[in-house]
Amino acid sequence: MQNTYKAEPYRIKMIEPIRETTRTERETLLANAGYNPFSLRSEDVYIDLLTDSGTGAMSQAQWAALMMGDEAYAGSRSFYRLERVVKAITGYAYFIPAHQGRGAEQVLLPRLVHKDGMVFLSNMHFDTTRAHVELAGARAIDCVVDICFETAKEAPFKGNFDLTKVTHQIEEKGPDKIAGIIMTLTNNSAGGQPVSMENLRAVSALGRHYDIPLIIDGARYAENAYFVKCREKGYADRTMREIVREAFDLADIFLMSAKKDGLCNIGGLIAIKEDRKLFDTCRTHLVPLEGFPTYGGLTGRDMEALAVGLEEALEEDYLAHRFDQVRYLGDRLIAAGVPIQRPVGGHAVFVDCRAFAPHIPYDQFPGQSVVNALYLEAGVRAVEIGSFLLGRDPDTGENLQSPLEFMRLTIPRRTYTYRHLDVVADAIIAIHAKRTELVGLTFEYEPPVLRHFTARLRPITP
Ligand SMILES: *Cc1c(COP(=O)(O)O)cnc(C)c1O
């Protein structure tokens, strides 16, 4: 590691004004939103850390590339440009564009399910990935290492597969029942925790031994490779291109939401190493689901911006700065005694709200209570990843208890400055100082599925 950037490795050419509100205004706005920040208008949010998906800033090179978009229905020049970039990065033979990650999942995953009773094994399935696995009639089983659930314990690769768990699943179910192994890079649901190359190599060997395809769900594959470079022995002097290529060589299929490490506001892709039959059947399904094979739900200009973004996301200056921003926010919270998942992941800081507000029971949603307090304190929008998100047991109707109650502070790429992060840290530290005043929440309206997006809540006043 040569440089530690203390300032952003870019200067600002275009600005988007954001608006501060008063605490009184925010009290009304949050009550009107049913104590669920998903229902706030973005204009009423000062600093928006809801997600890093599609919320980053494009570079001047990307904005310039937009003008080069070829909007032909078939055979677009922009498709061929993007295809060249994807093939050069992955080394794979086949490329299919999609409108975003879940579009790519919808096209690919059902093609791997050949019979009843099949399962996918993953370190951790992302929620849309899990949904597409289940819609395809298969089941999704997570095999992440247990240390991932111990938020205070430091380890370099908390996103890894537990090799004993995955081997056990393969042997118990039978290799012919395993539709695929999904390696999520970085492990989003575990807080953006990385997977080591050693672990990827071991999982790849298992897949080859049992003839099971290995799929990289690589929305944040560049961030994962940068963790490997910084933390894994033998990778410090390797280029980003070499590291990502080594990872792709170990897998068979690459699925990507380009709204993350594609540095775009929309986009997704599938790349397939060598299975021509799989490529043909995916392309056949692509047409009714996403669009003709040379646009797959994207405009020509989207494909141009993505071709540039994929290359920029592998630049070390950019990655060093991104990691430094996330670490900076994490370090400020740690210094003030705020409990967070450690070490911080690649794209977000996760505040451990069970430790933050232990007096709030899981079915009164401690994470959501802290999220709401943060909005009231400073107009900062975060998101709950815990029992509120998890929902109810479909059989008993009981609230399920999440093993972790998180508030996720997701950092959009190239969007906010260190000063913005100071505002976030100051506000959380202030709430932490008066955390005993936090109260739980109960439902006023609860939709039957994916309740966290549209539910309305009410604070339980003592
Ligand atoms: C975001 C994400 C997806 C889904 O992608 P969308 O672009 O949101 O549809 C799938 N897998 C992982 C790991 C993700 O982070």
Image: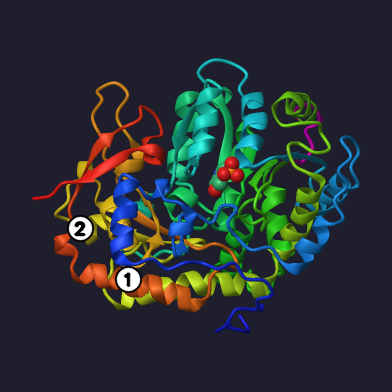
Residue 342, placed above or below residue 247? below
Where is mark 1, residue-wise? Answer: 427
Where is mark 2, residue-wise? Answer: 357
Q: Secondary structure at mark 2?
A: loop
Q: Say which residue appears at 84% left-offset and 57% top-offset.
A: 67
User: Residue 38: horizontal and vertical position, in percent?
Assistant: 41, 47
410, 47: nearer the viewer: 47
* Quarter placement of the N terminus: bottom right
Q: Is residue 272 magenta?
A: yes
Q: Say which residue appears at 77% left-offset and 60% top-offset.
A: 308
User: Residue 107: horizontal and vertical position, in percent?
Assistant: 67, 30
Visible residue check, residue 171: yes
Mark 1 or 2, nearer chain start = 2
Location of residue 108 by image quarter? top right
Visible residue check, residue 151: no
Which residues are drawn in magenta?
271-278
Q: Say which residue appears at 26% left-offset and 25% top-offset.
A: 397
73, 114: nearer the viewer: 73
Q: Say which residue appears at 66% left-offset and 48% top-offset.
A: 266
What residue type is disc 1 on? Ala
Q: Ligand 1 quadrant?
A: top right
User: Residue 186: horizontal and vertical position, in percent?
Assistant: 54, 54
